[in-house]
Every structure is written in C-alpha cells, then in structure tokens.
Image (cartoon, helix red, strand yellow):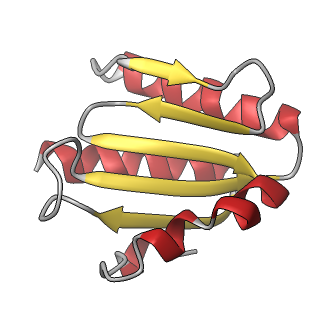
Amino acid sequence: MRAVLLRDKVIGCLEGLKGLDIVALDVSRITDITDFMIIVSGTSNRHVKAMVDRVSSEAKEAGIPPIGVEGRDTNEWVLVDLGDVLVHVMQGQTRSIYELERLWSELPSDTESLI
C-alpha cells in the first residue's frame, strides 16, 4: 500500500509542475527492484530539474528520501530512485529516442495515472 501512496504523491507533484505524458507502470510482478516506474517528459532542462527537485523534496518531507538521483549533470534524463517507485524525468526528445514505454509494453499501465 505504501508504494501506491508514494506513486500517487509523485504523480501529484509532476502534475502540479505540468509534467507531460505521465505514465505509471506497475512492474512489481516482473522485478524485485521496484513496484512502480513513472515516466514523465519535461519541456527543457530547467523543467526537468524543477520536477526532480520537487519530487525529491516532497518524498523527503514524507519520510522517503531518494536513495539516489542520477543524470542531474545535463537534466536530459534524470532517474530518481525512491525504492518502491522509480521516476524517469526526461526531455521529450530523449524520451522518444529510448522509448521506455515500448520496452515495458507488455505490462498494463495504471489508467488512473495515465495523463
């Protein structure tokens, strides 16, 4: 249940900062690494940075500090590891190159979290 609440909190942060094409994938049945993977696009490196900062800050305030944050050097693709939830914050062009959703396409997306 904790993972679902964290997923919803992260999605709320991303929506609040106008994150684009938010997708939440439940990967709990196929990996022990995390329960949910959230993918969101930003319009610029500043937008990506703002979303990463907000998610990290809100999670920390909720008692779940990020385990790690990778990619802050360019803010093209930043991964925020919150344990039960992995957040991929990407610029649109980077997201279209790597197509993470296609890699996980066999999984049902959480339609409530699909924006």
Nearest the camera: 110 or 91? 91
Quarter of the image for residue 29 reads: bottom left
Nearest the camera: 49 or 12? 49
Residue at image coords 64%, 49%? 16
Residue at image coords 38%, 54%? 37
Residue at image coords 89%, 43%? 44
Labels in figure, total: 0
Asked if residue 5 is positioned above or below residue 25 in the image, the reply reads: above
Res. 18 visible in picture: no
Nearest the camera: 21 or 99? 99
Res. 105 visible in picture: yes
Asked if residue 49 is positioned above or below residue 73 in the image, the reply reads: below
Asked if residue 38 is positioned above or below residue 46 in the image, the reply reads: below
Q: From the top left corner, tell me how far across and down residue 114 is, in percent.
A: 50, 75
Residue at image coords 23%, 40%? 84
Q: From the top left corner, tell me how far across and down residue 46 is, in percent.
A: 86, 32
From the viewer's perspective, is 7 left or right of 45?
Answer: left
Q: From the top left corner, tell me how far across and down residue 9 is, in percent.
A: 40, 45
Q: From the top left corner, tell me how far across and down residue 7 is, in percent.
A: 34, 50
From the viewer's perspective, is 115 left or right of 91?
Answer: left
From the viewer's perspective, is 24 left or right of 20?
Answer: left
From the viewer's perspective, is 98 left or right of 37?
Answer: right
For the C terminus, the image quarter is bottom right
